[in-house]
Amino acid sequence: MLDFFSEVRADLDSVEQQIKQVVQSRDPLLTQTAMHLLNAGGKRLRPAFALLAAKFYESTLDKILPLAVALELIHMATLVHDDVVDDSMTRRGTPTVKANWGNKISMHTGDYLFAKSLVLISHYENPVIAKVLAQTSVKMCEGEIHQISTSYSSKQGWRDYFYRIERKTALLIAASCQLGAAAAGASERDCQALRRYGHQLGMAFQITDDILDMVADPKLLGKPIGGDLRQGIMTMPVIYALEKSQHSERLRQLIEIPDKTDEQIHEAIELIKEAGGIEFSFNAALKYVEKAKGNLARLPDKPVKETFHRIADFIGVRRF
Amino acid sequence: MLDFFSEVRADLDSVEQQIKQVVQSRDPLLTQTAMHLLNAGGKRLRPAFALLAAKFYESTLDKILPLAVALELIHMATLVHDDVVDDSMTRRGTPTVKANWGNKISMHTGDYLFAKSLVLISHYENPVIAKVLAQTSVKMCEGEIHQISTSYSSKQGWRDYFYRIERKTALLIAASCQLGAAAAGASERDCQALRRYGHQLGMAFQITDDILDMVADPKLLGKPIGGDLRQGIMTMPVIYALEKSQHSERLRQLIEIPDKTDEQIHEAIELIKEAGGIEFSFNAALKYVEKAKGNLARLPDKPVKETFHRIADFIGVRRF
């Protein structure tokens, strides 16, 4: 993603510095866990979107920086809370004492990062920022619980999937685009156009994420493929294949196995590919990308508009 | 506590109704877990303080209600997150799969309740409310992590203890008193006086809580005594006894045992009592109560002032 962010590279460096300052705590353990998360890196996609959205308008970095930092802190908080979930899953119900300490610390570290984001947000006079982020947070929690309560169930359909990926990814990216513009003083109409761009791009992003989880080079992905299947998370390629595959009964069986072997994972992925699940999902992502770009037409004609186009195109074809 | 709240009884019923509405979610599991928490009851101490503080001023319920509900949601969120911690402790590091699902659901339910509180808070125009609650939340997280990282360590002293109980209890009660007044349009001076009252009362409340954990009738307490010792949490009676007891080395040994037997718990409590730890803590709580009442003098002379006095006196001598 890096080269798309050249316009805001210096601003992103400021975001990085600010995050480092913000996560400092009086408690050495807390500082340590938060810094660990920070140093683990990440694309800083949400701050980048907020900073880029602000570039459509005349604004200064100090107006956008607290928001940009807050968005990344919220994202980090959800990641660390997700770790709690994943950790206990992969250990199949028997975490060691150490893993358990890890879970507790992870939970409170996530809470801490989230609370820190609120302190930053509380300095904005524009009430829209706190409102949108509060509503987004509620929906993100709903999505997490939905994912847990429906996992390993092959009965869920399209509605469940869209409900979940909207909450998992699209809403926070939508908020990043919308609020970056809002903090820069954009009109409500522009803010909504950027929100829709972010929402549709976020949907495309999550669909491509779900595809990559099945087809990526594990080295580029940074983890073994099939993670979603292992965790019982039903993604678009799976739902499509369950409808269209000639071997849908076998696929259904495989999906509902709680502790799948690597062979079972690979068999499931082959059935999904064979049924056209990857191609279908790829096309669905491209449709979202096109929709997202449609929102850019009426925004101010600034160089950053081209960047928004290019990011959208990249999301549609990304391989990592 | 119930009879102290007679002035706000009808308002507290409205709080209860509002909480019920607020925790409704599209996800049936989430509604279920949140309703379960709600029905578990509780003294609704924080909403009561906010409502009572507002009674010093001319105000209407609709101005205080969202805050009162938000305060209870934040408190419930911390309780459910505490459960995650306690659960894994009592199971001594080997939770069942079921317990683990429970942990994950508990974590996200807590996140959800907290996020819901933000939606309520985001409707206030007065920026102080969001700011104070954000800062309070940060400090509450710091306290949680501090409690985990220092547990079973007999080396911590008074500073650690006060740091922790301030974050665990006093700050949210302080915020409840302060912000109830702020939402009702009180002057900054009055808000600060009520904040100090809440802070000192909260300290007294937590000290008496820590005493009761050692000396209460388990039936009134609703759980076996010695819970803090079991979890390795060092409270005032323990810290005092470690300094003053003639058997402090034996006490230190007992405290640092991770999985204590009931006999060890009772031996530790006897040593603490013998060293005067309970009496000392009782007197410390009474000092905080007196300090708390000192803040009331310059507040408006309304009937509710007498209630604040009576609540403080009750906290100092409570047995449940």
Image (tube, coloured by chain):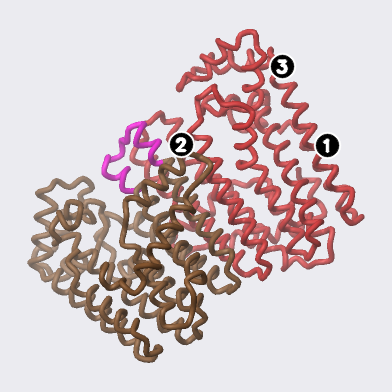
Chain colours: A red, B brown
- Quick one: B175 or B31, which is closer to the camera? B31
- Do we see residue A44 in this rendering? yes
Residue pictured at 60% horizontal, 65% vertical: A120
First in sequence, mark 3 or 2: give its number. Answer: 2
Q: Given contact means CB atoms under 8 Å apart, are the residues at marks 3 and 1 in contact?
A: no
Nearer to us: label 2 or label 1: 1
Q: Secondary structure at mark 3?
A: loop
From the image, which quarter does the C terminus of chain B lie in?
Answer: bottom left
* Residue holding disc 3: A276
Q: Which mark is residue B282?
A: none
Badge 3 and badge 1 both on one subunit: yes
Residue pictured at 58% horizontal, 53% vertical: A74
Q: Secondary structure at mark 1?
A: helix
Give the magenta part as a residue range.
B85-103
The main secondary structure of the magenta stretch is helix
Residue pictured at 51% horizontal, 69% vertical: B62
Say above or below: A290 vs B305: above
Badge 3 and badge 2 both on one subunit: yes
Residue pictured at 78% horizontal, 55% vertical: A53
Q: Disc 3 to disc 1, how far (Cα)?
A: 21 Å
Residue A94 highlighted magenta (yes or no): no
- Quick one: B212 or B183, which is closer to the camera? B183
Circle 1 chain: A
Residue sitting farthest toward the right: A301
Q: Position of residue A218 (x, y in %)?
A: 63, 27
* Residue holding disc 2: A87
Q: Position of residue B294 (x, y in %)?
A: 32, 87
* Residue holding disc 1: A290
Q: Position of residue A50 (x, y in %)?
A: 73, 55
Q: Position of residue B164 (x, y in %)?
A: 35, 65
